[in-house]
Amino acid sequence: MKKFCRAVMYCIGLVILALGIILNTKTGLGVSPIISIPYCVSNIWGVNLGNATLCTYILCVVGQMVLRGRKFRYFDLLQIPMSVIFSRVINVFNDMIIISFNSLTLRVLLLGAAIMLTGIGVAISVEMKFVPNAADGLTQAFGERMNKGLGFAKNMIDIVCVTITVLIGLIFGGKVIGIGIGTLAAVLGVGRSIALVNMLFKKQMSALVN
């Protein structure tokens, strides 16, 4: 019964995470770092956002293989089919949600909700200890390789993602795409929202695992 509950909660976490990511893109204030690359590619070449996200996540798995070498577990290849499902959910929300208001106040409020939902989704999906999100798996692998904490690793991955996004935008689109105050807010806010969720509900979530 616990395994079933964990699976359900894991799926709920991924759905909430996808919703948070898409709401972040809809604010027009800048997207979160990890989704900035597929968002930029999608805008320049008209590639489906879900498909661009899937390709990015597959590259994240390849990155884990390089960083971990022989320590890479074949089990972690399950991140690829998980990414296929996750990217389809991304597409559903991207097609369903249309933001028509121009009020900066409402956009900031939407950004706050997006960051909170992203944090909730990450906290739930990670705590269930199933197949990790490919981006989270890359962050963990980088931290292990550098002998640094997860926080340092995430900051470095975020900086790399933003740098790549800026370069792609400037070289192929002639401008910076997807990077803005919302990107900085996501960098600072998602971690805090994860910490808040863990502080309030970690015991209840852990009870499903142990």
Image (tube, helix red, strand yellow):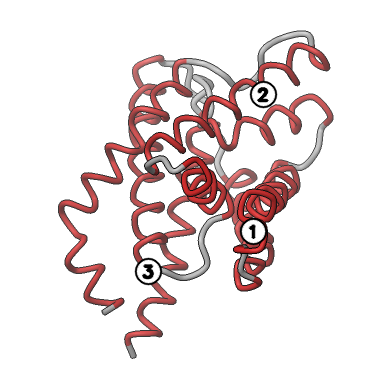
Q: Is residue 69 above or below residue 25?
A: below
Mark 1 lies on a secondary structure that is: helix
Which SS class for mark 3? loop
Query: Which residue is identified by label 1?
Result: 83
- What amino acid does circle 3 point to? Met
Look at mark 2 in the image and give the residue it sits on.
165
Q: Would you call the spot at circle 1 few (<14 residues within 10 Å), some (14-19), or many (20 or more)?
A: many
Residue 105 vs residue 144, the one in the foreground: 144
What residue appears at the point 50 percent right and 40 percent down from the top-left corner? 146
- Where does residue 125 sit, x and y in percent of width and height? 41, 61
Q: For the point 75% across and 33% down, which residue is it? A: 42
Give the quadrant of residue 152: top left
The amino acid at mark 1 is Ser
10 Å crowding of disc 3: few (<14), some (14-19), many (20+) = many
Judging by the rendered image, the residue that carries numbered circle 3 is: 128
Real-space CA distance between mark 1 and mark 3, rounded to the nearest whole angstrom: 17 Å
